[in-house]
Image: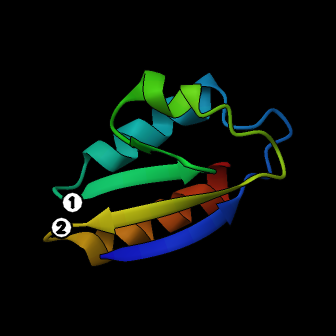
Amino acid sequence: MQQFDYTISDPMGLHARPAGQLVRQAAAFKSRVTIRRGDREVDCTRLLRVMALCAAAGETVTFTVDGEDEQAACEAMRAFCTESL
């Protein structure tokens, strides 16, 4: 299992377009990818659940990746966040 924290830098927060891209990115791997904000943790392959987190600009979320390709998935998710969130 691997984890990393990311602070949302997009002024609009985690809104529909980047949330959709995040879901597609997470679905490309066999590993289970989750995102946590506060005490809520959701599966990154569920668009409505990701959007329901209401992660705003400046908030820190935690990604957890667990599975057979977790190394590659974690690196890809971290790169995605840096470029898109």
In x, y percent, where is residue 9? 80, 52
Q: Closest to the observer: 29 or 2?
A: 2
In x, y percent, where is residue 49? 45, 28
In x, y percent, where is residue 58? 84, 52
In x, y percent, where is residue 40? 52, 43
To which residue does mark 2 refer? 67
Q: Give SS at disc 2.
A: loop
Name which residue lies at 47% across and 42% down. Answer: 22
Name which residue lies at 86% across and 39% down. Answer: 11
Q: Closest to the observer: 40 or 5?
A: 40
Disc number at residue 40?
none
Q: Reply above or below: 16 against 44.
A: above
Name which residue lies at 81% across and 32% down. Answer: 12
Q: Give SS at disc 1.
A: loop
Assess whether mark 2 and mark 1 are in contact (beta carbons under 8 angstroms).
Answer: yes
Q: Name the quadrant containing residue 10.
A: top right
Q: Name the quadrant containing residue 7.
A: bottom right
Name which residue lies at 18% across and 67% down. Answer: 67
Residue found farthest to the front: 39
For disc 2, the neighbor class at 10 Å (few under 14, some 14 to 19, many from 20) is: some
To which residue does mark 1 refer? 31
Q: Name the quadrant containing residue 57.
A: top right
Q: Earlier in the sequence, mark 1 or mark 2?
A: 1
Give the quarter of the figure containing the N terminus. Answer: bottom left
Q: Reply above or below: 10 against 30.
A: above
